[in-house]
Image: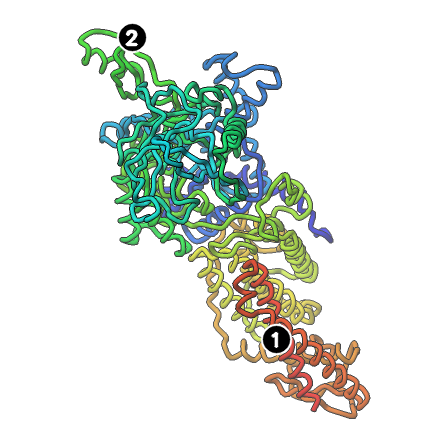
Amino acid sequence: MDKTYDYKRWEKELYEKWLKHRLFRATAEEAKRSGKPTFTIMMPPPNVTGDIHLGHVLDNTIQDVVARYRRMSGYYVLWQPGTDHAGIATQNVVEKELAKEGKTRFDLGREEFLKRVWAWKEKYGNRILEALKRLGVSPDWDRIRFTMDEDYTLAVKTAFVALYRAGLIYRGKRLINWCPRCGTALADDEVERKEERGKLYYLRYPLADGEGYVVVATTRPETYLGDTAVAVNPEDERYKHLVGRRVRLPFVGERRDIDGNPVEAEIPIIADPVVDMEFGTGAVKVTPAHDFNDWDIGERHSLPKVQVIDFEGKMNENAGRWVGLDRFAARNEIVKAFAEAGLLEKVEEHTYAPGRCYRCGTVIEPLPSLQWFVKMKPLAEPALKVQEEGRLKIIPEMFVKVYRNWLENVKDWCISRQIWWGHRIPVWYGPDGKEFVAHDEEEAKRLAKEYYGREVELRQDEDVLDTWFSSWLWPFATLGWPKETEDLKVFYPTQFLQSGWDILFFWDARMVMAGLFFTGEVPFEVLYLHGLLRDKEGRKFSKTLKNYREVFELLNDYGADGLRYGVLSLTPEGRDIRFDEKALEVGRNFANKIWNATRLLVLSSEGVDIDLKFTPQKPYQKWALHTLKLYAERITDALENYRFDEYAHLLYHLIWSNLADWFLESLKPDLKAKDKNAINLAHYVWLQALKLAHPLMPFITDAAYEHLNLPEKEVSLMRLDWPRIPYDFPAEYEEYEALKEAVREFRAMRDLVGLKRAPYRGDADPLFEILAGAERGEADVWVRLPSKAEVYIGLSRQQRDRVVERLRKEIEQLRKVISRIERKLNSQFVERAPKHVVEAEREKYAMLKAKLESLHRQLEALG
């Protein structure tokens, strides 16, 4: 067995071996023959545009841990992989490539452009899945699905037609989020908001009768050209006398509403309770065509809707002298014009949160547009009910409230997108605009002929469906729906879905709605939500900040198991994850520890015929078996309840802190003596530990397993049963724990004095001398160690006095540090400081308090 663990070699060899033996394969026929319960996991499909990042590492490590654990626990597991066509993102990538050639998609036309996108997808689309193989994940790669596969396209069309015919899809002119950069509508959930510094402009609108003016405050003066009212709160005493009067919009000439009707420059002052009296002056401009709240006000008061910004983000013909200007350039010019006319009261610094496109970051423009929508309320009600009934379990529970709040306040979903890459909306229009919704053009023609009584020419809708409209079908469309396939019967509903909390609305909740509507089943039993990865200071990973490293670099530096262990160990339940590369170093060192411990066992057992038959005899052996039992139970409980960081930490404490540091050290005399009983027992213990670690660290555990000289072996630990330890030695466990405590206290006191070995006396296990660095001898002073075992360390008087003086100084210094932290951890600091800073201080405080207690115990023992 090599001296060091070459993870690059083993990762390549073992993954090829796993694939060769088809360890990840799952078929309906095999599942039925096996007689095992099925356990299905749906891989959240990464975008075909994507390069692997740490979010994918976390997602797929979690899923792989679950998949491997469930296989070893007696389930027949399907882990379904695939990719998402990612409409806007993929089209943007290909359009950027075209731009390098000096072309646009319009130069190519729809058909040729789509050929280019398909070619790009074939070349790059699966690179992220190939990258995931480096991580060691175990989905059935023979079953890869793509959200624009032929079968999947049938599912999307079937879903659209079914919803339309149920009255849940409609077309209407509504205010939508529009991205001028991507050239498409966005759903509300696809608009990101974060606070930014901006300006608040106070504009004077002259009263139409010439008696003064009303001052309105706005962050968007460029939209004033589309104002159709000024609104005040009906309870605002300052403006009650003005309600019903009119103001005149400066510089506004002829303009028309979205239906083509002329609209005057004089607009009414209206009262509406939605107006915030504390914002600005308490009087607000109302622009129904460019603000969602204003749209609602316009509906309540029957106001015309005047659009002044077009779909490219430029001022349209209603903008008069500013027509053709970019919206932000127009803002500057309009403010300048107001200032020159004496109509700009003031400008203030202001913090606000403009909506930005989740893909490109462009400030979105609310625009009135004819779009397709899904009615969400009727779909949301069953999704709320199944959670109430316990048919859907959300982990951690803190997200139940978030899930329910979104569903209880859900708005209709805009599903049409003005791009070319994606599922084209299955709607055809007749010569008079009559719409025909059908699975294909042939069905649409038949419906049109029935309607018109003759054959007519049809035109298909140019738009495509929102990417999320296809991915909300993922749990059942991947298994063959709408066909009644064996896969669907055997593997659906699924058991486990994990995702970041940030797509709870985009994807997770919508999948619940879709599953219930189309199949009558909750698509997954457990929804596990984890936090988002951030740097150790809590910032998002960003190319600008350069605060992250590429995954392949991390894999090369730490190995797959080191990366997997590090990321999972940092993942607290539900909270965002502060990534620290030191955790990966811990993971790599842990893998090396497993290798070195295995090597010690293997080399020391040469010449022994291992058959795994043993009788536990010595206290350390019984302690090891009992410890193994306790940790196996705790680890199983953590995995059953999806507490992944706890699983990682329990593994570390079992294998490194207990088995390597204590069991193997205690075993060494028996290894040296070639004690077959002890060696058999050690192989049993180590094999169980490797099995417990396998779901998280599959490479090092299988590499170690290959080196164990066992009578029978499987192709991988994953083919073995999950450990159920039948041994129970509570008395011997406590006895050995007391020995460990005595050894630790003896070592600590010995280290304080600066001795490699020290004299002792008292009743102790024969192992005490080996583990503690102790020997029988004489001394001036015998110090009773603060432990359950009656053990004394021998010191000279000078040694004792030096140690007492040193301990007193350390205690005094430590008290001062603890006192400073106590003063710092006052309510003001706790309330104002960032959460992670407060947590770090509290952890430091707890650690120092524990150290102080330990020093006091040592000082007390010295007398």
The colour scheme is rainbow
Q: Amino acid at mark 2?
A: Glu
Q: Is label 2 in a helix, a strand or a loop?
A: loop
Front in this rendered view, residue 80 or 663: 80
Secondary structure of residue under mark 1: helix
Please say if 294 is above or below 496.
above
Q: Position of residue 285 (x, y in %)?
A: 39, 36
Question: How crowded is the residue under tag 1: few (<14 C-alpha within 10 Å), some, or many (20+)?
Answer: some
Q: What amino acid is labelled 1 in the image?
A: Lys
In space, the residues marked 1 and 2 are separated at their CA atoms by 82 Å
Compared with 481, 790 (above or below) is below
Q: Nearer the viewer, residue 334 or 425?
A: 334
Quarter placement of the C terminus? bottom right
Q: Earlier in the sequence, mark 1 or mark 2?
A: 2
Q: Is residue 655 visible?
A: yes
Look at the picture and state if 610 lies above or below 198. Answer: below
Q: Which mark is residue 849?
A: 1
Quarter occupied by residue 592: bottom right
Q: Which residue is mark 2?
A: 457
Residue at 78 percent of width and 90 percent of height = 778
The residue that appears at 62% across and 83% down in the rendered structure is: 787
> Depth check: 660 or 353 in front?
353
At horizontal 26% and vertical 7% (from top left) the residue drawn is 456
Residue 170 picture quarter: top left
The mark total stands at: 2
Q: In the image, residue 727 lies at what x, y percent?
A: 48, 70
Residue 316 lies left or right of residue 509; in this view the side is right
Query: Is residue 767 in view?
Result: no
Front-lying residue, 164 or 11:
164
Is 694 above or below relative to 24?
A: below
